[in-house]
Image (spheres, grey):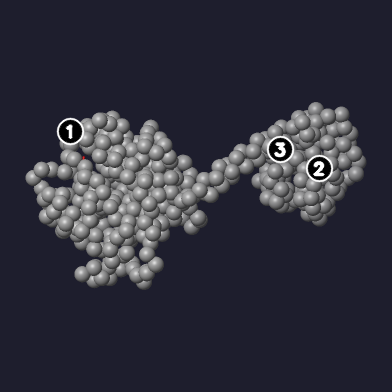
Amino acid sequence: MEPIRVLIVDDVTNTREDIKRFLYFEEDIEVVGEAGTGEEAVELAQSIKPDVILMDINLPGMDGIAASEIISVEVPEAAIIIISIQGEQEYLKKAMAAGARDYLVKPFTSTDLAETVRRANAFTRKRHLHLVGREEKRGARERALPGKTITLFSTKGGLGKTTLACNLAVALAGETGKNVVLVDLDLQGGDVSVMLNLTATHTISDLVQEELEKDVTVTDTFLAAHFSGIKVLCAPASPEQAELVMPQHVTKIINYLKTTFDFVIVDTAPSYSEINLNVLEITDHILVLVAQDLPTLKHVRSTVEVLGALQYTEKIGLVLNQLRPDGISVKELEKNLGQVMSAVIPTDDKTVLQSVNKGQPFVLGQKTSRVAEKVVELARKMSAEKKAVKPERQVPGIRSIARIFSLSR
Ligand SMILES: Nc1ncnc2c1ncn2[C@@H]1O[C@H](COP(=O)(O)OP(=O)(O)O)[C@@H](O)[C@H]1O
Ligand SMILES: [Mg+2]
């Protein structure tokens, strides 16, 4: 074991000698430097990088507290122990706030001193290892390619976006064994947490409140863990809280999640809100829900045109949900929309209702049902699908929905 390297900071030579004598017989502790002023302490701390610094408060010029403040930032791996005399208690609080790890009040015994040095060192080592581990983990994750984003979209409600988003996310995790996060962007009426039987202790609105101006980091605190292994960023608990979430927040959040998850699945509200437009811009795939009635077909046709005007055609996948024998045929839909279906999901009221009421995705609870099989098939397809490459030609300044519609007409 390497000895604990100690720097002594005190303007009185005799005090430094006393401390050295105290530590002389401790085999695991070695005094590697001495400083008589705060400035000297900062310099030595930077150059010799001690494990522990024994710091006097009263120093000529820069005092021990100011020196601690600088050292705790510039040499965070060094544990600072403040040495004070009786009656300096008021300074101790300041010293701790300045980053000191512990303190000793004179007079103290050699055992007190050695034990405090060991304890402070052990703590700082542990924290340092933890931080390094975390950095390495984050580095490894961020070095990997950004995750694939899949957004479920339709301008009409009730077609099955949320049902499919939940089951697709869980199926993707199960099929690929990779990290999946599901983001509920139906801010006013999101029901992902209900469908997955999750208690949302934190939601996207807490996240934007905490991280309003900073670069967003979505820590696990903000994500609910589902027993299937997927993580969920839940919708706000109330409409007032939903108001706090701005389009630029959503962009930052999704972009961040892409750096830490292999798949980001986004459930949306049925509209061309600014938030949805931002998401559609940065998503890799857009799954547009289709149904077999004329009003829905009209909606979908218009959606395909709008997305085309935004140059997202490559990203679009059509998903016919709730297939029924009496509706417009699949062939006809495909002909009308100029694109074949990426998936055709059967109607299965019993399975879906049971799954919803239990809060358990049918791809887990009713694996052998046709509806589950079809969603798993879609998950496989989406995991294999190449990310669409955005065309070079850009439509300038697309943010006004009126413009998009005039473009698509
Ligand atoms: N394949 C399906 N078979 C039967 N019912 C379904 C199916 N998909 C969705 N549903 C039901 O349709 C309704 C709307 O689904 P939902 O996922 O909430 O739609 P959206 O999120 O698009 O508004 C729900 O009651 C849901 O249980
Ligand atoms: Mg929904």
| Camera-nearest label, 1 or 2 | 1
**Which residue matches tag 1?**
350
Three-letter residue code for mark 3: Asp
Q: Residue 8 at what x, y percent from top left? A: 82, 42
Three-letter residue code for mark 2: Leu
Asked if residue 54 can be seen in this view, the reply is no
- Mark 2: few, some, or many residues within 10 Å (few <14, many ≥20)? many
Q: Is residue 152 left or right of residue 335?
A: right
Return the mark for residue 102: 3
> From the Cβ of disc 3, is ligand 2 less than 8 Å away?
no
Q: Residue 290 at what x, y percent from top left? A: 20, 51
| Camera-nearest label, 2 or 3 | 2
Q: Is residue 405 left or right of residue 265?
A: left
| Closer-to-camera residue (129/371) | 371
Q: Earlier in the sequence, mark 1 or mark 2?
A: 2
Q: Secondary structure at mark 3?
A: strand
Q: Which residue is at the far left?
A: 326
Q: Residue at x 38, y 62 (%)?
A: 390
Q: Quadrant of the C terminus?
A: bottom left
Three-letter residue code for mark 1: Lys
| Closer-to-camera residue (224/255) | 255
